[in-house]
Image: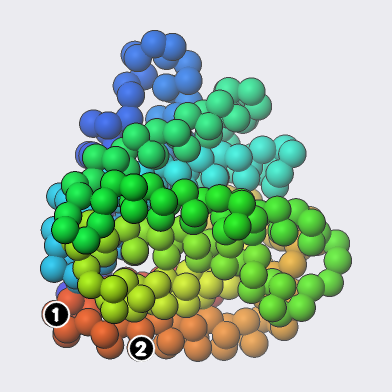
Amino acid sequence: MDTDIYLRQRRELVEKALDSWIPSEETEPPLIHRAMRYSIFAGGKRIRPILCLAAAEACGGDADAAMPAACAVETLHTYTLIHDDLPCMDDDSLRRGRPTSHKMFGEGIAVLAGDALLTEAFALLIRTPENDVYSTADYVRELAEAAGSRQLIGGQTLDLESEGRPLSPDELRTIHNGKTAALLTASLRLGGMSAGCRHSLLRALTDFGLKAGLAFQIIDDILDITSTPELMGKTIGKDMRDAKATYPALVGLDRAREEARELVQGARSALDAFPAAGRETLAALNDYLFNRKF
């Protein structure tokens, strides 16, 4: 499998679907729709929606049925980026190589654009066809729980509370599981659910997602130290500046790299529940996430 070709093709499919479903810039009132589309079409690898599509196919489903869920996850993810960048949160001026939403449109419109994308995510999600195993209510519950106060927002809250104070590895893992792994895992689970997958495969997708998601965040922590704004498309070194708790700060770069390797290996092992043909793409994507320069 040529992972680069696969990613490019799937990214194009996701962006075509997003373009057709997100209101155009001419839709009244145009300012909010311009701000929404500015952020959602600012680039990015579309990792979460691509994982959603790959999980659907690994469970015997197809990309068309999973596409509304894939776009819902990406729309919700974009809302989190807009809000994370606000001055009251991480206070960043660069995202995906472009000025952040509040730098372009002001803080008020940035907040509203994030709110609108969060709401739009659920309007997209309910387009996902029901099947004999999962209903629309199951899809909505899955995404709402991942994005809510016990997971994504909870992780962000703990992250804000932890600035400037030492954390234990377990506390840091809880933050990363909420901020990053929860939505990545929900992406995979929604893909499997759209395919009507049996519960044993849903458990395997969950195990895979939690390990791959935590590895993804650890690698991001490392890249915040070792990479450049040109490669990352965002400001580098902010974690250290803001005294944020990260794996490199807690255990050092070498141990953080080793932790990421162990998690990636564990994620790959979780795919053993799938037939060989079903796990090939997910295994390749797992390797891709790990092999970023860190």
Residue 279 higher or lower than 70, as above or below: below
Residue shown at the point (26%, 64%) measured from the top left: 192
What residue would you read off at disc 2?
A: 269
In the picture provided, is 138 more to the left or to the right than 290? left
Residue 79: % across, % down: 51, 40
Res 59 quadrant in image: bottom left
Q: Position of residue 99 (x, y in %)?
A: 56, 36
The colouring scheme, among rainbow, by chain, secondary structure or one colour, is: rainbow
Label drawn at residue 177: none
x, y percentage for residue 248? 69, 76
SS of the residue under disc 1: helix
Q: Is residue 4 visible?
A: no
The residue pinned by badge 1 equals 277
Q: Residue at x 50, y 62 (%)?
A: 182
274 shown above or below 182:
below
Q: Amino acid at mark 1?
A: Ala
**SS at badge 2:** helix
The residue shown at (64%, 73%) is 173
Mark 2 is on which residue type? Ser
Rendered location of residue 50, percent (x, y): 29, 58
Crowding at label 1, few (<14), some or many (≥20) Cα neighbours within 10 Å? few
Residue at the extreme top: 28
Q: Residue at x 58, y 72 (%)?
A: 218
Dot 2 or dot 1: first in sequence order is 2
Q: Quadrant of residue 123?
A: top left
**Count of numbered circles in the view:** 2
**Is residue 177 something that shows in the picture?**
yes
